[in-house]
Image (cartoon, rainbow, N blue to C red):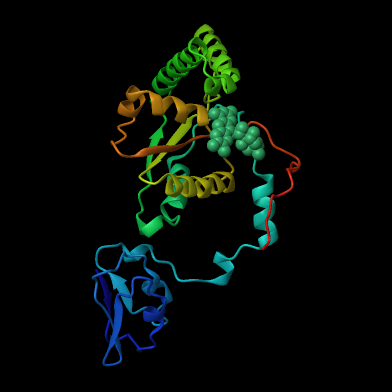
Amino acid sequence: MMNVNVDQCIGCGKCIEDCFASDIEMTDGIAHIKNKTCFKCGHCIAICPTNAVSSNTLDMKEVIEYSKDEFQIKSDNLLNFVKFRRTIRQFEDQAVENEKILKIIEAGRFTQTGSNMQDPSYVVVTEGISELKALTFESLKNIGQKMLDDMTPETRRYSGYARMWLNMYEEYKENPAENDKLFFNAPVVIVVTADSIVNGALASSNMELMTNALGLGTFFSGFFVRAANENKDIRNLLEIKDGKEIVTCMVIGYPKISYKRTVPRNKPNIIWK
Ligand SMILES: Cc1cc2nc3c(=O)[nH]c(=O)nc-3n(C[C@H](O)[C@H](O)[C@H](O)COP(=O)(O)O)c2cc1C
């Protein structure tokens, strides 16, 4: 429930104007939240000039007062940060601190979700990485083999991947400790699941930014997602609930390499009307 402290409310009406759910009314010059259509987006908490609004179900201790110095990023810096980000596939043999993993998840948790569903969930794999890897390599090999066995116009387009997965599997089997073209011997994997793929993907994108801000490197493993979506054993191992989509798999560790510059990209395809 959202509540207004009647002693603090000055009746300015800002919360009413900003309430998308139209759940707040003015009664005798005081804002009153009906808590009927409220979906707990917290805009009323964020906008109130006298900090009169609170929730008794959410943790108010995590609300932070705005200060320009601590909250603002220059747009050019943000753009450079986005441009300089690279997929990292070479990792140091070094564990990632739990505080850093939690900070990455925090960036996902505070990402917007449709209807404020807050549906993304996170499976953090560290100790179980070898088991997950073995299952995934096996799965990719089976998918690849099946694609090559019954070639259709659709699977023909991806036959390059099918062959790549078979080769990856063979190399891994030869030397599992060294040859890992799936997770590249990274120490951490975070699998992001969600009811809505868009919500999970948006969360993942912010998590990636945080990963880089922490001096870590990451890549998204589409191969893992492909394998996990075809193999119930992977879902079971990760205890992923029915109905949750496996949206991304972030492979994380300390980068062994550093880049010197950004890379060029295709020109944007924009329609101005
Ligand atoms: C959805 C998605 C899936 C990806 N899957 C893989 C993967 O399975 N293995 C891998 O090594 N890289 C994977 N990548 C990394 C891309 O190959 C990489 O982003 C692209 O080549 C551009 O390089 P950059 O990220 O350094 O700009 C994936 C990236 C995305 C966004």
**Closer-to-camera residue (16/173):** 16
Quarter of the image where the N terminus is located: bottom left
Quarter of the image where the C terminus is located: bottom right
Residue 177, above or below 244? above
- Percent coordinates x, y for residue 194 in the rendering: 37, 44
- Percent coordinates x, y for residue 118 in the rendering: 36, 53
At x 53%, y 21%, the residue is 155
- Percent coordinates x, y for residue 137 in the rendering: 46, 17
- Which of the 4 image quarters holds residue 245? top left
**Closer-to-camera residue (93/37):** 37
At x 74%, y 41%, the residue is 263
At x 33%, y 79%, the residue is 52
Residue 63, above or below 201? below
- Which of the 4 image quarters holds residue 246? top left
Residue furthest to the bottom: 28
Residue furthest to the top: 174
In this view of the protein, can residue 178 be seen by the observer? no
Is 269 situated left or right of 36 in this image?
A: right
In this view of the protein, can residue 17 be seen by the observer? yes
Q: How many marks?
A: 0
- Percent coordinates x, y for residue 5 in the rendering: 27, 81
Residue 164, above or below 53? above
> Which quadrant contains ligand 1?
top right
Is 59 situated left or right of 255 in this image?
A: left
Residue 227, above or below 109? above
**Closer-to-camera residue (50/233):** 233
